[in-house]
Image: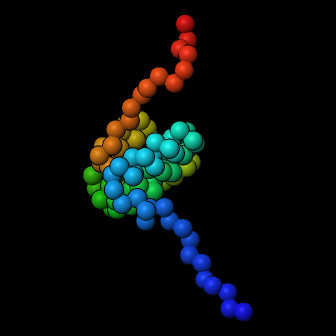
Amino acid sequence: MKMAKTQEFDPAELLDDQETQARYLRLALEEDGLPGLMQALGTVARARGMASVAEATGLGRESLYKTLRETGNPRVETLMQVLDALGMRLTVEPAGTPLT
């Protein structure tokens, strides 16, 4: 019996519009925090074209790849540059009982 070849799944191929990309980023942040957000940002950047995002942010492509991985530790300024390049923004909302 001949085995079928499998292809690695790449979620970037499904992120074809800004609303879907925003939802993907939101869920990644909610479920996995900053590491999840960084990985999802990398996926969205690949969906948009990493070279285009790198050019828009003024960062090198390789530097952007390193920053936008699960173990990346970007400065807030870099995070905001990437979100801006993607036409996204970070928002804050109440999540529970505040400290008194």
Residue plotted at (43% across, 46% down): 23
What is the number of callouts on the image?
0
Q: Nearer the viewer, residue 20 or 66?
A: 20
Residue 49 in view of the camera: yes
Q: Nearer the viewer, residue 57 or 98?
A: 98
Note whether 47 is above or below 83 in the view shown: below
The image quadrant where one finds the C terminus is top right
Residue 50 in view of the camera: no
Residue plotted at (33% across, 51% down): 18
Note whether 98 is above or below 52 in the view shown: above
Tell me if 86 is positioned left or right of 31 in this view: left
The spot of residue 3 in percent (x, y) is 67, 87
The spot of residue 48 in percent (x, y) is 34, 59
Note whether 73 is above or below 91 in the view shown: below
Toward the left, the furthest residue is: 56
The spot of residue 6 in percent (x, y) is 60, 78
The spot of residue 31 in percent (x, y) is 57, 41
Residue plotted at (56% across, 48% down): 71
Toward the right, the furthest residue is: 1
